[in-house]
Amino acid sequence: MPHLAAEAGLADDPARLSGPGFAANGPVTSLRDWLDRLSATGRLAVMRPGIGLRFELAAVSKRLDGEKATVFPAPDGHPVSVISGLVSDRGWMAEAMGVEPSQVLKRFQEAARNPVPWRETSAAPAQEVVHREVDLMTLLPSPTHNEFDSGAYITAGLLISRNPKTGIQNVAIHRLQVSCPDRLGALLLPRHTLAYQQMAEDEEQDLPIAIVVGVDPLTLLASQAIAPLDQDELEIAGALHGQPLDVVKCITSEVRVPAQAEIVIEGRLLARKREPEGPFGEFPQYYGERGERHVIQVDAVTHRRNPLFHTIVGGGLEHLLLGGIPREATILDHLQRSFPSVGDVHLARGGVCRYHLYVQMKKRSEGEAKNVILGALSAHYDVKHVVVVDEDVDVHDPTEVEWAVATRFQADRDLVVVAGSQGSKLDPSTRDGVGAKMGLDATAPLDAPEMRFKRIRVPGEDTVEPGRLQAGTDWRSGRAE
């Protein structure tokens, strides 16, 4: 496979590497620009051709997760290359936005509050090639990731649906089992896609949908926003880009899809139709169980010439961070509306970037932290455990949060437990998604004596430069006789 920059016609134009897609102070708006950025900075690994689609590709991706994105030319001899690990580092996401890491949540909040309507075009790279006779098993290099997965899956597909009553779109990522040449099994959790599907099913109608594989990092991020029903996440993507997202109408339905996408699968969620799907390795690092799931009938596939197929390995950093960062931004927005004292939030990696939420606040009155806990638990049903800490604790450092719990929390005074709550159906410790939630108030009492919770600090520890003071490494020569 040629170098991505060469394939895109960039290799002989060094100035192109500093163009709009690469600007350090601007967002990346193209998947191929992002790949070239990663390649130019040593963060893209191109594998030898022929890597196996069953397990081998996922094994390589997982080993490099967080270090390098990967390109797999001709996997198992398939003509379509597979890419993975595109946004498997928090700093990479900040870079794609064109902001400092500390500004990621603020930037996402701004985009969610101020969406930019998309711009429709009549011609698009996503429709350069059209297949109306569809065999997904031949057309797509869909990998099998984990040992007990029920087969090949599409894991990075943005499923776009339209409200049957309003026509407003929703974008989400669902796991999609390649069941046969023209059908997909879909796990629909209680979110907006399922709401739209139920509206259509109540009228005995199929729900037209499109599955988009291969988009830029910011459109990926936007798809995971915790937005209200009838908020089109493609408009949040436009706000992140700083310009309207170009979309094109599907050839078999009214659904609009990103015009620059690599691959688009057009189809319908079938009314009153369920078929077996799963098991599949999910973000909690366990298998989602097999069950009777929704079914997508595929009507057409369109794609670019020489398309790229994006896959996300279940439970890897790309999977966790894609879900975690947009949730953090929208949870922070939700909390700050009622609690201006909240300064920062973090969905911890140890809680699979879904279940464990750390909240930093400047407490002004006793009891306020417990109210924040209750507000955080209501922000999203996935949130299971909340720890609230003072503003001197870094919520992005799990050791700092654990220290706060160890030294500022007492279970008989500071613990909140809510039984019988809706949680994640993918959490194996629940009873079909019903379980307990817990909050820990790890803030110091406001009336404590000044020195009781004063953190120790060595003057100069943050500014001293030991290297400039070092005389050598021979301990004997430095002794005073």
Image (spheres, helix red, strand yellow):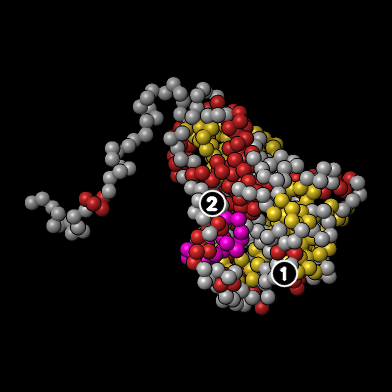
- Rendered-image quadrant of the N terminus: bottom right
Q: In the drawing, does residue 197 fall left or right of residue 120?
A: right
Marks 2 and 1, how far apart in space? 33 Å
Residue 12's label in the rendered image is none
Mark closer to the chain start, 2 or 1: 2
In x, y percent, where is residue 313?
62, 61
Q: Residues within 10 Å of mark 2 (few under 14, many from 20)?
A: some
| Looking at the image, residue 2 lies above or below residue 365 | below
Q: In the drawing, does residue 418 fall left or right of residue 473?
A: right
Magenta range: 28-47
Residue 316: tell me if it is visible.
no
In x, y percent, where is residue 436?
65, 38
Q: Nearer the viewer, residue 222 or 12?
A: 12
Residue lying at the far right in this picture: please name it. Answer: 204
**What's the residue at 86%, 48% (across, down)?**
200
Residue 140's label in the rendered image is 1
Q: In the drawing, does residue 231 fall left or right of residue 357?
A: right
Residue contact between numbered discs 2 and 1, judged by CB atoms under 8 Å: no
**What's the residue at 66%, 61% (across, down)?**
214
User: Image quadrant of residue 216?
Assistant: bottom right
Which amino acid does the dot numbered 1 rest on?
Leu
In x, y percent, where is residue 164?
84, 46
Residue 26's label in the rendered image is 2
Q: Nearer the viewer, residue 121 or 290?
A: 121
Does the segment drawn in magenta span residue 437? no
**What's the residue at 49%, 67% (across, down)?**
14
Does the segment drawn in magenta span residue 32? yes
User: Image quadrant of residue 336?
Assistant: top right
Which amino acid does the dot numbered 2 rest on?
Gly
Q: Nearer the viewer, residue 301 or 22?
A: 22
Callout 2: SS: loop
| Looking at the image, residue 233 lies above or below residue 475 | above
